[in-house]
Amino acid sequence: MRYLGLLGGMSWESTAEYYRLLNRGVARRLGGLHSASLIIHSVDFAGVAALQAAGEWDLAGALLADAAAGLERAGAAGLLLCTNTMHYVSDTIERAVSIPLLHIVDPTGRAMQAAGVQRAALLGTRYTMELPFWRHRLEDRFDIDLIVPVAEDRAAVHRVIYEELCRGRILGESQALFGAIMGRLADAGADAIILGCTEITLLVSDRDTPLPVFDTTALHADAAIDFAIASESAAV
């Protein structure tokens, strides 16, 4: 089994979910006492969040690129960036290493393409919803249109992520709020919902909307397991 290098801590709440999904997934696939081979670099999110808010993306990218290089030196065969937002600097990270970065948009795009999705709604941080990196990769590689909530709803989603979910607070009223926002996105023509923040899966699921839900955290982890156990599967 190949080692996965996890760039985590953004926030640690979702990194813990990655750890659970990866280990349970490997155990389910390989059986017995198998678990995932992982190397984790968990950053202090306060510093990264401050760089995000200040628009200092180059500095944030350099920080994560240095961490990624350290994971490669430690023996990682592939990288998992355990956050949607920081994929904005994925090119900077990729330039710092010779191992693959398993991009979070790709498994989500493949799953939606297989399901026949044509117009998906993206929920995430303000940066993920408003910066072009998610939209461009999804449209260019998978020919799927992307819509986002209106400005007031984008602000509400962003607030819940940073003030609640990243701090481990799961509130019923926020679940209801997200349900209402997803309803408005359905009315706007979305035929699927993307949980495009790795913390949102802690709050809502496909039970909260009649639309099909694509959980980037779960899909990303599953693709990483494919990568990690490819040599194991070939040997069977």
Image: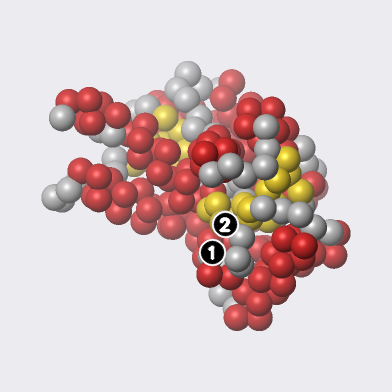
Q: How is the image coloured?
A: secondary structure
- Evaluate whether residue 185 shows in this view: yes
Q: Which residue is mark 1?
A: 206
The answer to whether 235 appears left or right of 201 in the picture is left
Give the image location of residue 57, x and y in percent. 73, 38
* Three-letter code for the amino acid on which mark 1 is drawn: Asp
**Which residue is at a point 57% across and 57% down the rendered structure image?**
212
Q: Position of residue 101 (x, y in %)?
A: 50, 30
Which image quadrant is residue 37 in?
top left
Amino acid type of the residue that numbered disc 2 sits on in the rendered structure = Pro
Toward the viewer: 110 or 234? 110
The crowding category of the residue bearing disc 2, from other C-alpha atoms within 10 Å (few below 14, some 14 to 19, many at least 20), is: some
Q: Which numbered dot is residue 116?
A: none
Residue 178 placement: quadrant:
bottom right
Residue identified by numbered label 2: 212
188 versus 222 height, above or below: below
> How many numbered marks appear?
2
